Amino acid sequence: MTTVTTRVPVAGPSARPGSKAKRHYATHLVLLVLAVMWLLPLGWSLYTALRPIESTNEHGYFSFAGPYNFDNFVTAWNQGGFSKYFWNSVIITAPTVLLTLFFASLMAFAVSRVSWKFNVTLLILFTAGNLLPPQVLAAPLFQMFKHLDLPYWFSDSGSLLNTYISVIVVDTAFQIGFCTFVLSNYMKALSQDLTEAALVDGAGIWTQYWSIIMPLCRPAFAALGTLEVIFVYNDFFWPLLFIQSGDRLPVTTAINNLQGVFLSNYNLLAAGATITVIPTLIIYLLLQRQFVAGLTLGSSKG
């Protein structure tokens, strides 16, 4: 008697029902729509800036006719004085970001790595400060800076008005809460064994903060630094409120110099707006890896 053996193929992982890789078409579609919504205004501004105003007046803004050149960018740079205003933005942005990250790291270390009575209370207060609209404090801050007498060798206005310091102080104060919240959550995810071992070896609080915790927070600092540069650089409200001298205003206000008295050249304004965006794009592209790593690193901690 002959026995016939039939081989039954064993179903592999790919043959199991429901084991096929899921296609996130809905997610990709939403991300694509959001990307187009974000990039469309920037692309349209760049396209408008490359067209002469004569071509736009003849064919309309929603047309694709006419020559394309960089004349609007050259005119906007010279007429708007962007070289001077860019330097003013650097004077305001660089100290603000450094001071914000430094003070926020001190506060985050105190509320996350040190056990004391008011650490949670202070963290809640710093976080709740972000819920307060900055415009509510505009009038009180203006009056306070106006009546704060300073020597004229320090301020030519005799007060904190019309100085870079006024904008730096206010921007730093309003950004510390957000940075403290982010850094404290990041520091909590670090192992307590690090500081406990340092404490056994005789390291003080400052040594634990500066030599152990700070180097480990570099990804978080890179992500926050990128965000803070963009936030402070793009700030328009506080410089316009506190600085009254035109030669000290940041680059976000330089577009006002491109406005006409009776008519506005919107092609020229688009070129000026595009110029102001370029530094933030460069900073983001240079720190893109650190920015993404700082945002996603905490998700892998168990």
Image: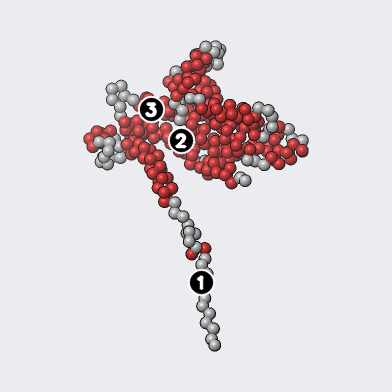
Q: Nearer the viewer, residue 254 or 6?
A: 6
Instruction: Say which of marks 2 and 1 sits in front.
Output: 1
Q: Amino acid at mark 2?
A: Pro
Residue 255, disc? 3
Q: N-terminal of the two: label 1 or label 3?
A: 1
| Residue sticking out furthest to the bottom | 1
Mark 2: give few (<14), some (14-19) or many (20+) Cα within 10 Å: some
Numbered disc 3: secondary structure = helix
Numbered disc 2: secondary structure = helix
Residue 16, visible in the rendered structure: yes
Residue 302, image x, y percentages: 62, 46
Task: Tell me the residue at 38%/31% (across/down).
Answer: 272
As drawn, is 241 to the left or to the right of 302? left
Task: Tell me the residue at 39%/35% (across/down).
Answer: 274
Residue 39, image x, y percentages: 39, 40
Location of residue 111 with respect to 8 vertically, above or below: above
Instruction: Say which of marks 1 and 3 sits in front.
Output: 1
Quadrant where the image shows the N terminus: bottom right
Which quarter of the figure has residue 57?
top left
Q: Amino acid at mark 1?
A: Pro
As drawn, is 263 to the left or to the right of 32? left
Numbered disc 1: secondary structure = loop
Residue 148, image x, y percentages: 54, 13
Q: Nearer the viewer, residue 187 or 88?
A: 187
CA distance separating discs 2 and 1: 61 Å
